Image (tube, grey):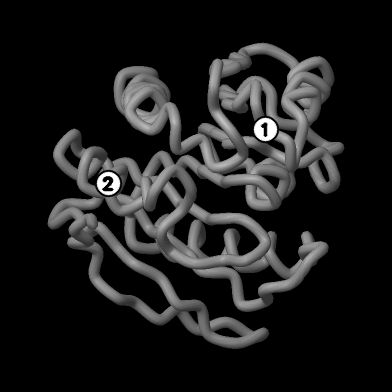
């Protein structure tokens, strides 16, 4: 079981409303948009790590907006999902949050890469067990930092996916391969929690 202190939020868009959970800050500061895989949802992988990260980052001065994709299907629709991320990110920017980072798992990993390739104001990118389809423009992220995390025991999307994306990306970039972790990364939950939290503090607050 886990607690979720995120506030429910519906964001309108020309393609339909988005269901979100917002860990808001009273004074806008840095923020992160989080998205899951093709099946959507607000909890994320690794035994619902997104609400936990929301609380962690909030305590360290970073707001989080968890966005549920409007379209849940396999294979995922990258174009529709990028639209959703950008709606969330631009909402935060309009509210005065800056800089803004993005975090995505599986299908969502490729989607956050494409979203950041389109929106230069997205300042930091993290992927968890990312697929390669939709991530082709990773080279366009530089000089913004990229962190890729993948489990070495992932049988749904091989760690070779993140290795390939890493090889195509320009610096600054980091690849972390976790022993014993499957696609959900639940076996290394606390490691992922620490890595992601420290990364966004370093790149969105300390690295300004």
Judged from the image, the secondary structure of the residue bearing numbered disc 1 is: loop
**Which mark's residue is nearer the viewer, 2 or 1?**
1
Q: Nearer the viewer, residue 19 or 181?
A: 181
Place of residue 146 in the rendered image (x, y in percent of width and height, measured from the top left): 60, 25
Q: Residues within 10 Å of mark 2 (few under 14, many from 20)?
A: some
Q: Which mark is residue 52?
A: 2
Residue 182, image quadrant: top right
Sequence-first tag of 2 and 1:
2
Judged from the image, the secondary structure of the residue bearing numbered disc 2 is: helix
Residue 189, image quadrant: top left
Give the position of the N terminus as an image quadrant. Answer: bottom left
Q: Which mark is residue 36?
A: none
Q: Is 135 left, or right, of 20 in this rendering? A: right
Query: Where is 138 relative to 207, above or below?
Result: below
Q: Nearer the viewer, residue 188 or 41?
A: 188
- Which residue is identified by label 1? 154
Name the residue: 50% across, 61% down: 90
Place of residue 202 in the rendered image (x, y in percent of width and height, measured from the top left): 36, 20
Name the residue: 67% across, 66% down: 83
Place of residue 66 in the rendered image (x, y in percent of width and height, measured from the top left): 41, 60
Q: Nearer the viewer, residue 102 or 36?
A: 36
Q: Is 146 left, or right, of 29 in this rendering? A: right
Q: Is residue 128 visible?
A: yes
Name the residue: 25% across, 39% down: 57
Query: Where is 207 relative to 119, above or below?
Result: above
Query: Where is 43 relative to 177, above or below?
Result: below
């Amino acid at each position: 079981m886990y607690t979720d202190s995120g506030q429910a939020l519906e964001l309108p868009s020309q393609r339909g409303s988005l269901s979100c959970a917002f860990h808001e800050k009273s004074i806008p500061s840095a923020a992160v948009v989080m998205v899951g895989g093709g099946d959507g949802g607000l909890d994320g992988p690794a035994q619902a790590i997104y609400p936990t990260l929301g609380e962690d980052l909030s305590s360290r001065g970073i707001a989080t907006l968890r966005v549920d994709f409007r379209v849940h299907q396999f294979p995922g629709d990258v174009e529709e999902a990028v639209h959703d991320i950008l709606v969330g990110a631009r909402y935060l920017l309009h509210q005065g949050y800056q800089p803004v980072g993005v975090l995505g798992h599986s299908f969502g990993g490729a989607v956050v890469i494409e979203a950041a390739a389109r929106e230069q104001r997205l300042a930091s990118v993290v992927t968890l067990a990312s697929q390669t389809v939709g991530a082709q423009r990773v080279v366009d992220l530089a000089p913004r930092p990229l962190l890729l995390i993948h489990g070495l025991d992932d049988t749904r999307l091989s760690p070779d996916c993140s290795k390939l994306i890493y090889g195509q990306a320009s610096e600054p970039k980091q690849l972390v391969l976790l022993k014993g972790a499957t696609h959900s990364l639940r076996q290394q939950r606390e490691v992922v929690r620490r890595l992601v939290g420290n990364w966004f503090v370093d790149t969105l607050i300390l690295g300004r």
